[in-house]
Image: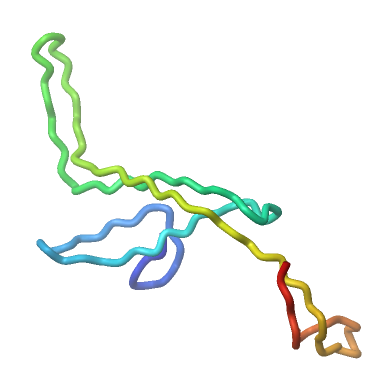
Amino acid sequence: MEQPQTKQLVSKLTLTLEPFQDITLVVVLKSPTVLRLINLMSLVKITQGKTYNIKQLDSGKRVIKEDCLQVVLCGRLENPIVHCNKALLDAQLNELVIPLAVRTD
């Protein structure tokens, strides 16, 4: 996810929200770059910071339950292949540096 204040990618994020406050989060999913089309699915766990210590009556075991919500994100990634038709050539390096005209498949 993208950390809203620093705009850096993080795998775990903790935010404190006031009642009725909302926030927009950017979720970034990594995918294989060699594939042009791929279906993606990710599971995001949202916790409220509350835990409950529960004692089961039948077995006497103590269980810690966390108050959380799991959200499934589903989508389709389409990576177009871009071909460079014209570009500026750096004569010293003998490399194309600035694409001027491109097309996609």
Q: Residue 15: x and y, percent? A: 25, 60
Q: Residue 74: x and y, percent? A: 44, 49
* Image position of 71 with respect to 81: above or below: above
Q: Residue 82: x and y, percent? A: 72, 71
Image quadrant in which the N terminus is located: bottom left
At horizontal 20% and vertical 60% (from top left) the residue drawn is: 16
Q: Residue 93: x and y, percent? A: 88, 84
Q: Residue furthest top?
A: 58
Q: Residue furthest front?
A: 105
Quadrant hosting residue 69: top left
Q: As rendered, which of 87 and 2 lies closer to the eye?
A: 87
At horizontal 68% and vertical 52% (from top left) the residue drawn is: 35
Image quadrant in which the C terminus is located: bottom right
At horizontal 16% and vertical 21% (from top left) the residue drawn is: 62
At horizontal 37% and vertical 45% (from top left) the residue drawn is: 72
* Image position of 93 with respect to 66: above or below: below
37 horizontally vs 95: left or right: left
* Image position of 100 with respect to 65: above or below: below
66 horizontally vs 37: left or right: left
Quadrant hosting residue 98: bottom right
58 horizontally vs 40: left or right: left
**What colour scheme does the image use?**
rainbow
Q: As rendered, which of 25 and 38 lies closer to the eye?
A: 38
Tally the marks.
0
